[in-house]
Image (cartoon, helix red, strand yellow):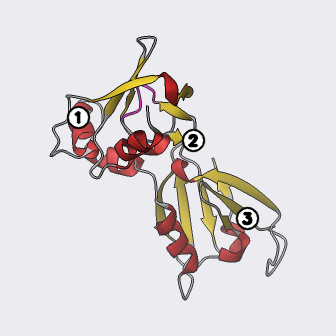
């Protein structure tokens, strides 16, 4: 399989789920393009859990060499006019409400960047899929990378923190949504379980 062909299938707008067929007869279904990594000679395919209706995290990953792929096939459960979100809402409607599905859609990196760069800055809370939250009061204590954010947690005993007490690494695909906070005291900037 040519890398460019697979790249086009992963980047298709709107995305259409598809099946990857291998030379040994094995198949992998790709429902969410963002949980897959296409390298020069292989693809790392994210395998989701049956209990999870959205593109939150992979249950595990499989490495497949591109020369082992014989062909790709569109999956029949979504019509070409349906987006993957519409299709998934139908597929999981008996298990997950629409509001729950929307909450589980990961926050985009650009959205998080805009919240960190706001002028004047407004403190906000980061919500994770596991229910944990982090309050961000000082944008310069945080480092936003392509796939994660390093959140700086200030020490409670410093009146005006210029450095953080410790940091937490959070993958962007673990963030469900952001929430504005009223201007509150820095001591509230803690991780909550």
Q: Residue at x 45, y 52 (%)?
A: 106
**Is residue 38 among what the camera can see?**
yes
- Residue drawn at point x = 53 percent, y = 41 percent: 37
Q: Position of residue 156 (x, y in %)?
A: 79, 68
Q: Majority secondary structure of the magenta segment?
A: loop
Q: Is residue 112 magenta?
A: no
Circle 1 — which element?
Answer: loop
Q: Give the residue at x 61% y 65%.
A: 135
Frontmost residue, 26 versus 130: 26
Residue 163 horizontal side relative to residue 180, left or right: right
Q: Quadrant of residue 134?
A: bottom right
| Quarter of the rendering containing residue 158 | bottom right
Question: Which of the labelled discs sits on residue 152, or is there none?
Answer: 3
Left or right, residue 50 beside residue 166: left
Mark carried by residue 39:
2
SS for callout 3: strand
Residues drawn in magenta: 48-53
- Spatial CA distance of label 1 from label 2 is 34 Å
Name which of mark 3 and mark 2 comes first in the sequence. Answer: 2
Instruction: Assess disc 1: are there few (<14), some (14-19) or many (≥20) residues with their C-alpha within 10 Å of its C-alpha.
Output: few
Mark 2 secondary-structure assignment: loop
The answer to whether residue 24 is above or below residue 127 is above
Quadrant housing the N terminus: top left
Residue 153 in the image: state x and y as whole percent.
74, 63
Question: What residue sits right under mark 1 in the picture?
Answer: 93
Judged left or right of residue 157, residue 36 is left
Q: Is residue 130 above or below residue 192?
A: above
Structural distance between the alpha carbons of marks 3 and 1: 38 Å
Q: Earlier in the sequence, mark 1 or mark 2?
A: 2
């Amino acid at each position: 399989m040519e890398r460019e062909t697979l790249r086009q299938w992963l980047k298709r707008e709107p995305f259409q789920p598809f099946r990857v067929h291998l030379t040994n007869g094995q198949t992998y279904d790709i429902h969410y393009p963002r949980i897959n990594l296409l390298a020069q000679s292989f693809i790392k395919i994210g395998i989701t859990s049956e209990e999870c209706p959205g593109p939150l995290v992979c249950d595990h990953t499989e490495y497949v060499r591109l020369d082992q792929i014989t062909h790709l096939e569109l999956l029949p459960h979504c019509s070409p006019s349906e987006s993957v979100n519409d299709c998934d809402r139908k597929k999981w409607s008996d298990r997950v409400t629409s509001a729950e599905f929307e909450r589980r859609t990961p926050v985009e990196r650009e959205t998080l960047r805009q919240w960190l760069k706001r002028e004047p800055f407004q403190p906000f809370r980061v919500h994770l899929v596991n229910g944990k939250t982090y309050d961000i009061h000082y944008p310069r204590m945080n480092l936003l990378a392509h796939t994660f954010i390093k959140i700086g947690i200030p020490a409670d005993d410093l009146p005006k923190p210029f450095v953080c007490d410790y940091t937490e690494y959070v993958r962007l695909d673990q963030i469900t949504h952001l929430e504005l906070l009223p201007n509150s005291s820095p001591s509230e900037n803690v991780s909550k379980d």
